[in-house]
Amino acid sequence: MAPFEISNDIFILYHQLWRSLQEGLSPPYPSPRSPLPAELVRIIVRYAGLAVPDRTLTATVSTRVDVRCKLGPYKVTIVWFYTKPLTSTALANIAQVQLVTVSGDQGWTTDQNPVSRTWYDVGIFPEPPQETTTSVTNEENRAKAGRFSGNGSNEPAADIRWTPARKNKADDWSWMLANRDIQKHFNQQDDMRWQCSHFNPCAHRKAEHRDGQVFEKDHQLWEGVKSGDVIAIRVGTQYLNWVNSAHRGELRVWKYFEPVLLV
């Protein structure tokens, strides 16, 4: 997975910009400028979108999950991991989030017009969602989202296999789904909280780095967010024998830049 960082040169540039705005320019500079109050500098920096990685909120998981759809038109989703609860201070400082994965699918398809059927969603909830869902694509069965539906013989619609990393970091499991067998019935309003991050390339088995969509603070994802909410990640697949193999995931959180030390 590609490193989550900015260069030292960029970081120093941000510091110099902040200092220049806050201290102003005095003669002998040809265009003197009065110093600006810190609050106004903060507004300018945020409007310019200057952001740096926030590693305290970034959530990383090395526990692999493989989700295989076993029944024709079914859509299968399962929560993979989620962040710590967001504080009001964190919400005020977050600039954007992005999910990146090391992932792939089953590596083949018989579709004449191949389209990827494996994807990742990001959602924000008041509490950690405990969800394993299957649903089919017609209206009658869509209401069953949140429960396993079989084929008349109670056969589960999916195979889900979890493979913990051999050497997890101490906090790698801290905010994982505590009981992956618990199923929670979500209504349609809950399901609308999820926003698609990205798809795996179609028929590409090799697990490689995938960059998801960048969710800035003006995105629909953030509507109604409040202190105490968590950001959750789920794995999805659809149609017979499609497999989503999620090897590693990281929800990268960026915060608006502020200098380490104001002088």
Image: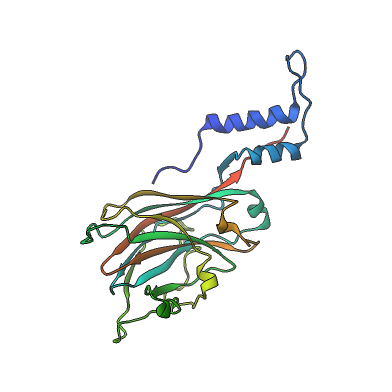
Q: Quadrant of residue 135?
A: bottom left
**Residue found at the far bottom of this picture:** 153
Q: Quadrant of residue 87?
A: bottom right
Whether residue 166 can be seen here = no
Indicate the position of residue 157 as horizontal and vertical percent values: 32, 76
- How many numbered marks does the figure carry? 0
Q: Is residue 137 above or below residue 250?
A: below
Q: Residue at x 38, y 49 (%)?
A: 210
Whether residue 209 can be seen here = yes
Indicate the position of residue 13 as horizontal and vertical percent values: 59, 29
Image check: 215 left or right of 67?
right
Indicate the position of residue 79 as horizontal and vertical percent values: 44, 67
Q: Residue at x 76, y 23 (%)?
A: 33
Indicate the position of residue 213 as horizontal and vertical percent values: 46, 50
Is 123 in front, or is 218?
218
Is 22 in front, or is 133?
133
| Display coloring | rainbow
Is the C terminus in the top left, top right, bottom left or bottom right quadrant? top right
